[in-house]
Image: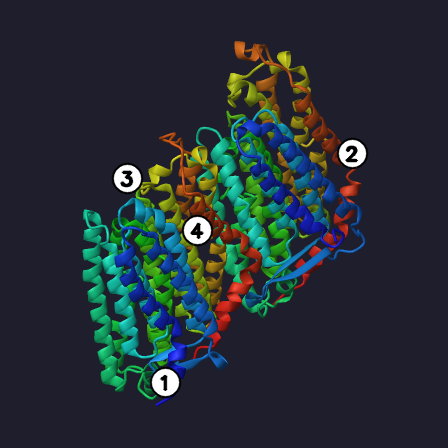
């Protein structure tokens, strides 16, 4: 038995977030009527303080384990947690006026968000199948409830139902896969499994079958083709503030999940899962980009765009070397911030009783509000990966990882789909700048939010000189992993 | 400090100036936007002039070197430098932007600040393309340029502008992304370096070279544009506002040729030699066939757009015969075409502003109501047809001379352009300018004002200067062309 205090110290951020979630649940009972703002402020405080704690609990030597090797803290975990906490912090700033106007402002909203954050943090630091599963379920259950938060909306209820059924199925798959791996290797500890696999035949049926189920489970959670059916429904049906959350922080957590399970656990089977991911990535890029073209609903279009982005993200992972992993890490962080800005803009364009969800709502925005039009255009160019936006460097890094392992054909396929993808992003820019506005109603937004959002979007281009620093962060983070 | 960072200054001054213009806001302050834009564009030209005066003509090496680390993880650097070829193109860019700003002074009345800002930002990006010596930096400038051009055509363009601008964007994006794959391949081959100099040095087998050549070819041939990937150009040109057409014709088309000079010839010399036949045939098709297509046009802008493709055929022809005279001719042709096609598009713009039509049959007898304009246009039409004494002659003549030394048949086929070019340009001129006044609209035309006269006069002088005394232009590129041909002659196998 190690020193329990040392163990607890490594998990301070998680413990802190959990305690605060409980406190907010209690406090909200008393302040809900008179001072509703308190729970919001407390949550934001929790996220910032959590961020600070993550900064301070860096283990010596870059990596440490705790709680009988069920919990690991390394550079990848630290950076992912920082991204998750920071993204959630911004998400809540963007959502504040949205949920107030739509009568979704309840203490539970914040508690659920914090629980989801806790789930992600646990998942990121998991080094044992049980910890992985606990984290994943905590995240998923909180998200199911959040999607259904707008009780009176049929679309939201339907979306939550779909999400729940498919999510439960995915969890089942994952568990089934884990049980097979347990049968084959006799352990649930990821490191032990890795060592056990080294000594086994690489075509062991039980092992491969288990791996297939785990990949399927991850595929569901990530929302990649052919396990993507829930994504468009959720993105369209759920309240925009919740989509904003689902579309950002959990993507980073999903990266950590892949790193822990596939990269750490199944290093010995990299050839097998890499091939599976190649198929998944191509299908995702194709389906996502092609179906996005025919969408008329912006949220739905962004849903398909997410699917294609997850395909690009997998390109780095499937090259199965540290260079590729850090490329994917970089990709997912950049993507999260871009998508944060995209949904933030949708929220800003919406107002009580009006959701700016249809692409036609953005017609001629340049005439009504040039600055917002510019922001939306910049986000679209970043999503399309056109320099000088950061989206380009994300694509550059994964394509570079592919060429590094001599997968030239896949790089060319990725590039061709990027051109197809550019078309529907351009269509949005066209709508903004070239079409005539349908209403002359002025666009208004809270100055505070407008400022944060502007900083968010401008950062996508202004960050250029320092883009190398972010890449280095990702590289260093990956290099501290076992 | 500016001594060391002259190139950066030339890139970022117009970009920051463009943002400043954007900040002047809506159309109520249009006058301010115009003035700021003019000041910035003139300041940029002044910044680029020391590049010319401080340029060392005796060496073919890169000059005005700037080098800063940018993305260490991928060994990407912010490195800039120029040789004589890049210098001429940078000067052309700075010069053209001023003309564009002046020409749009009264014509653009809607979203004025955005219009000028787009051109200034594009100016900075184009100078960036010509001065980048890191492949990714080059690529960033190269692609970023699409955004302002996309908006320029889409917002201020003609009736079919949306189709044209999306076609333009996707065509060029497809080509560029394949180039990106090629660049990354070279990065891995050259031991993780994106520096162009390292890419020049890396050994490559012929198969590799042919693949890389094809990828670069896709990017640059679309931009030039070469037959058969030229179909975006007439659409984009016709729908773009006059200023957009000028920048497209005068500078953006040159980037394709510049790409051949910087990438294809030195990086894949063996493939360039073995595939030169293909390029030469495509160039000759562009010269002869596209000239004939130009003859059949009824729209003035479309005619000039096709004539641009034919003239750019001369550039690619000159580059791929690997003869010093032809290569120099090609580069001179690039600059000269920048002046002449720019001027032709501005002439059409002058007419379009008054009549709002570009169809030749709507005109006739313009000389009666606009005598001054008719004189200017006569001069540019002659220059476009390659009249000796104008810059159009120098480039074409040098290319034909150089090609003749290599293969007389090519030269004879290329020489037909002197007939065809004269035919379509002068026929257009005759239909639009000469004859009796054809209708009341023409009768009501006002002759050019001082502003229009001013920029047409400057262009006239430039064309004449280059036609009568090309030495200052040639002097700058001699050593750079020598260097280029040396690189292109060394086998990499």
Residue B313 visible? The answer is no
Percent position of residue B81, x then y: 69, 55
Judging by the rendered image, the residue that carries numbered circle 3 is A353
Q: Same chain for labels 2 and 1? Say yes or no.
A: no
Judging by the rendered image, the residue that carries numbered circle 2 is B468
From what the image shows, is residue B161 above or below residue A405? above
Q: Secondary structure at mark 1?
A: helix
Q: Earlier in the sequence, mark 4 or mark 1?
A: 1
Q: Give the alpha-carbon distance from disc 2 to disc 3, as whole Å.
A: 71 Å
Judging by the rendered image, the residue that carries numbered circle 4 is A384
Query: Mark 2 belongs to which subunit?
Result: B
Q: Earlier in the sequence, mark 4 or mark 3?
A: 3
Q: Nearer the viewer, residue A432 or A324?
A: A432
Percent position of residue B451, x then y: 67, 23
Judging by the rendered image, the residue that carries numbered circle 1 is A4
Q: Same chain for labels 2 and 4? Say yes or no.
A: no
Q: Residue at x 32, y 69 (%)?
A: A18
Q: Give the alpha-carbon distance from disc 2 to disc 4, as whole Å.
A: 48 Å
Q: Secondary structure at mark 3?
A: loop
């Amino acid at each position: 038995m190690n020193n329990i205090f040392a163990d607890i110290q490594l998990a301070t951020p998680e413990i802190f977030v959990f305690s605060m979630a409980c406190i907010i649940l209690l406090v909200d009972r008393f302040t809900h009527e008179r001072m509703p703002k308190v729970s919001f402020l407390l949550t934001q405080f929790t996220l910032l303080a959590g961020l600070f704690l993550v900064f301070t609990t860096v283990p010596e030597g870059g990596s440490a384990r705790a709680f009988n090797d069920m919990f690991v803290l390394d550079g990848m975990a630290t950076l992912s947690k920082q991204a998750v906490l920071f993204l959630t912090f911004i998400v809540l700033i963007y959502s504040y006026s949205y949920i107030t106007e739509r009568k979704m402002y309840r203490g539970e909203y914040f508690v659920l968000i914090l629980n989801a954050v806790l789930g992600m943090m646990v998942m990121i630091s998991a080094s044992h199948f049980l910890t992985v599963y606990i984290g994943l379920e905590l995240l998923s259950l909180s998200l199911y409830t959040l999607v259904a938060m707008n009780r009176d909306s049929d679309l939201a209820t339907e979306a939550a139902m779909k999400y729940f059924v498919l999510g439960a199925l995915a969890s089942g798959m994952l568990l089934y896969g884990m049980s097979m791996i347990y049968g084959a290797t006799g352990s649930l500890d990821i490191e032990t499994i890795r060592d056990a696999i080294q000594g086994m035949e690489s075509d062991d049926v039980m092992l491969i079958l288990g791996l297939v189920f785990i990949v399927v489970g991850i595929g569901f959670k990530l929302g990649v083709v052919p396990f993507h059916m829930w994504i468009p429904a959720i993105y369209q049906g759920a309240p925009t503030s919740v989509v904003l959350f689902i579309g950002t922080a959990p993507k980073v957590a999903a990266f950590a999940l892949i790193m822990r399970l596939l990269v750490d656990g199944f290093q010995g089977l990299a050839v097998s899962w890499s091939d599976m991911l190649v198929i998944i990535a191509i299908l995702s890029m194709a389906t996502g980009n092609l179906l996005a073209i025919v969408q008329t609903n912006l949220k739905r279009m962004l849903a398909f765009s997410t699917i294609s982005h997850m395909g690009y993200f997998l390109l780095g992972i499937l090259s199965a070397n540290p260079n590729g992993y850090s490329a994917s890490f970089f990709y997912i962080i950049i993507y999260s911030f871009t998508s944060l800005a995209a949904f933030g803009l949708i929220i800003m364009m919406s107002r009580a009783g009006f959701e700016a969800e249809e692409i036609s709502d953005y017609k001629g925005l340049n005439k009504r509000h040039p600055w917002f039009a510019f922001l939306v255009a910049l986000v679209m160019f970043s999503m399309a990966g056109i320099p000088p936006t950061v989206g380009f460097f994300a694509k550059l890094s994964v394509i570079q990882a592919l060429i590094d392992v001599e997968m030239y054909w896949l790089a060319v396929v990725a590039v061709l789909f990027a051109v197809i993808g550019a078309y529907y992003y351009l269509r949005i820019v066209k709508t903004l700048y070239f079409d005539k506005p349908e209403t002359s109603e002025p666009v208004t937004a809270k100055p505070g939010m407008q400022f944060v959002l502007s900083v968010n979007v401008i950062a996508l281009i202004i960050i250029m000189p320092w883009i190398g620093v972010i890449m280095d962060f990702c590289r260093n983070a990956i290099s501290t992993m076992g | 400090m500016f001594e060391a960072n002259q190139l950066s200054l030339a890139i970022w001054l117009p970009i920051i100036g463009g943002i400043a213009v954007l900040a002047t806001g809506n159309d109520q302050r249009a006058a301010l936007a115009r003035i700021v834009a003019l000041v910035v564009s003139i300041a940029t030209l002044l910044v680029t002039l020391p590049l010319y005066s401080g340029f060392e003509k005796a060496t073919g090496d890169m000059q005005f070197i700037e080098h800063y680390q940018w993305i260490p993880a991928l060994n990407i650097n912010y490195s800039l430098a120029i040789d004589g070829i890049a210098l001429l193109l940078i000067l052309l860019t700075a010069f053209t932007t001023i003309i564009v700003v002046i020409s749009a002074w009264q014509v653009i009345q809607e979203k004025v600040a955005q219009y000028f800002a787009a051109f200034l930002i594009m100016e900075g990006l184009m100078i960036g393309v010509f001065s980048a010596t890191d492949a990714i930096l080059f690529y960033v400038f190269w692609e970023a340029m699409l955004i302002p051009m996309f908006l320029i055509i889409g917002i201020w363009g003609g009736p079919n502008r949306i189709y044209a601008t999306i076609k333009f964007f996707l065509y060029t994006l497809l080509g560029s992304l394949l180039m990106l794959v090629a660049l990354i391949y070279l990065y891995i081959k050259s031991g993780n370096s994106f520096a162009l100099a390292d890419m020049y040095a890396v050994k490559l087998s012929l198969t590799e070279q042919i693949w890389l050549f094809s990828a670069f070819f896709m990017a640059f041939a679309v931009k030039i544009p070469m037959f058969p990937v030229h179909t975006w150009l007439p659409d984009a040109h016709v729908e773009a506002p006059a200023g957009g057409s000028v920048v497209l014709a005068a500078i953006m088309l040159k980037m394709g040729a510049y790409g051949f000079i910087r990438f294809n010839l030195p990086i894949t010399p063996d493939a360039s030699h073995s595939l030169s036949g293909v390029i030469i045939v495509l160039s000759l098709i562009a010269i002869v066939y596209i000239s004939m297509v130009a003859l059949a046009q009824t729209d003035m802008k479309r005619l000039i757009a096709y004539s641009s493709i034919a003239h750019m055929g001369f550039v690619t022809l000159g580059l791929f015969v690997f003869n010093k005279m032809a290569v120099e001719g090609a580069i001179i042709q690039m600059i000269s075409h920048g002046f002449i096609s720019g001027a032709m598009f501005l002439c059409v713009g002058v007419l379009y502003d008054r009549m709002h039509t570009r169809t030749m049959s709507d005109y006739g007898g313009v000389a009666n109501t606009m005598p001054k304009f008719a004189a200017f246009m006569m001069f540019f039409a002659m220059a476009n047809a390659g009249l000796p004494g104008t810059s159009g002659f120098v480039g074409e003549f040098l290319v034909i001379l150089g090609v003749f030394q290599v293969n007389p048949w090519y030269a004879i086929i290329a020489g037909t352009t002197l007939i065809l070019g004269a035919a379509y340009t002068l026929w257009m001129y005759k239909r639009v300018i000469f004859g009796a006044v054809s209708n009341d609209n023409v009768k009501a035309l006002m002759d050019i004002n001082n502003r229009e006269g001013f920029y047409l006069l400057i262009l006239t002088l430039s064309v004449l200067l280059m036609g009568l005394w090309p030495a200052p232009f040639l002097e700058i590129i001699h050593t750079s062309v020598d260097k280029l041909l040396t690189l292109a002659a060394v086998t990499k196998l």
